[in-house]
Image (cartoon, helix red, strand yellow):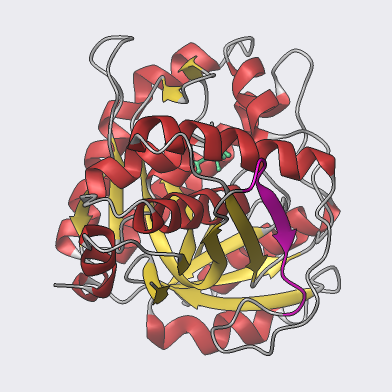
Amino acid sequence: MSRSARAAGSASPVRRATVTAPANIAFVKYWGARDLARAVPVNPSISMTLARCVSRTSVERLDGAGADEVWLAAGPAEVGAAAAAPIDPGEAFRRRVTAHLGELRRRLGVEGQRYRVTTANSFPAAAGIASSASGFAALAVAVAAVAGRQAAPEELSALARASGSGSASRSVLGGYVEWPAPGSPEDDPRAVQLAPADHWDLRDVIAVVESGAKEVSSLDGHRRAASSPHFARRLELLPERLRRVRRAIAERDVHALGETIEEEAIELHLVAMSSHPPVYYWNPGTVEVLAAVRALRASGVPAWSTMDAGANVHVLCPPEAEEAVAERLGRVAAVERLIRDGVGAGPRVEEVVE
Ligand code: PMV
């Protein structure tokens, strides 16, 4: 049994749990909701769970407290990093976390509990690197552990999504993950693993061209999606694209995967840019990186781009191409920094204190 399963299933009362949960990069994107409040998607999505872009979150039960506390841990999210005085995250962040805590308590049947949450990211937040996915996945896994709840990955997927961040439902699983669309509006679709991380070693070189917060949240993007004249057409094309991505993962066909995910990313942003009002996530650096990746391919290097709801570009490639990709992207003037990541195994319970 994994440490995470053991912790979540422990019958003894857990006082504090510390969890790292990874971001993910969507190959086929969740864009547009049937029910935004419950993060019920219009279309199925598929992603790769990352290894190094993680949120590290501690949840401590506060016995006798009347309210939750939410803190940002100062310093890096790496496990074992020296503890420094935590930082006040501000009202908006606190509200989103406490709303998720309320929903988690309700679903786990521990309404009376109050928590101190301390969290940090190993990468820039709100910049299209799925910080909400990793953050809410970490929170869900940690609260389930403190509640002493035996939680299977499917349940953790639903708990993570109760935050309102749909992509969080995929970050509770490692490797290659699909989050299906609902059969009916009442459905509660849960993510499933298509293949574990060791099925296929793929790398993701992330070109950071914008490390500040994006102007339009993905929630607003979902809200506006159906106003694009291209939204309905995208939905018609998606079943075939989903089949191609599933097959490419099963057969470890990087060329088929690469072509499909690049096409999908451009189309997602086409929908965003043609929404009312329009949503522009790209900046000039995004376009420079896209051109550099096309140039890499023209020179024989297998590498393909994708972007979530942000300006930063994820460049997917096999391990033997990673060096050439990093070298070329490092020469793009607009690139602030590169994050070298790859497929990862999913959340880990790092510490449980009873
Ligand atoms: O999970 P949300 O509500 O932040 O939406 C995620 C949107 C995309 O990152 C663009 C696509 C995806 O499937 O991750």
Q: Quadrant for the N terminus, please.
A: bottom left
Left or right of 230 on screen, residue 321? left
State whether residue 154 is above or below residue 345.
Answer: above
Q: Is residue 303 something that shows in the picture? A: no
Residue at (26, 41) in percent of width and height:
155
Q: Which residues are magenta?
A: 65-75
Q: Where is residue 8 drawn, in percent x and y?
A: 27, 59
Q: Where is residue 167 drawn, in percent x and y?
A: 47, 42
Whether 31 is among the magenta residues is: no
Residue at (75, 28) in percent of width and height:
279
Left or right of 21 on screen, residue 212? right
Q: Nearer the viewer, residue 45 or 319?
A: 45
Q: Where is residue 177 drawn, in percent x and y?
A: 29, 51
Q: Nearer the viewer, residue 243 or 112?
A: 112
* Magenta span main SS: loop
Q: Where is residue 53 drawn, in percent x and y?
A: 55, 69
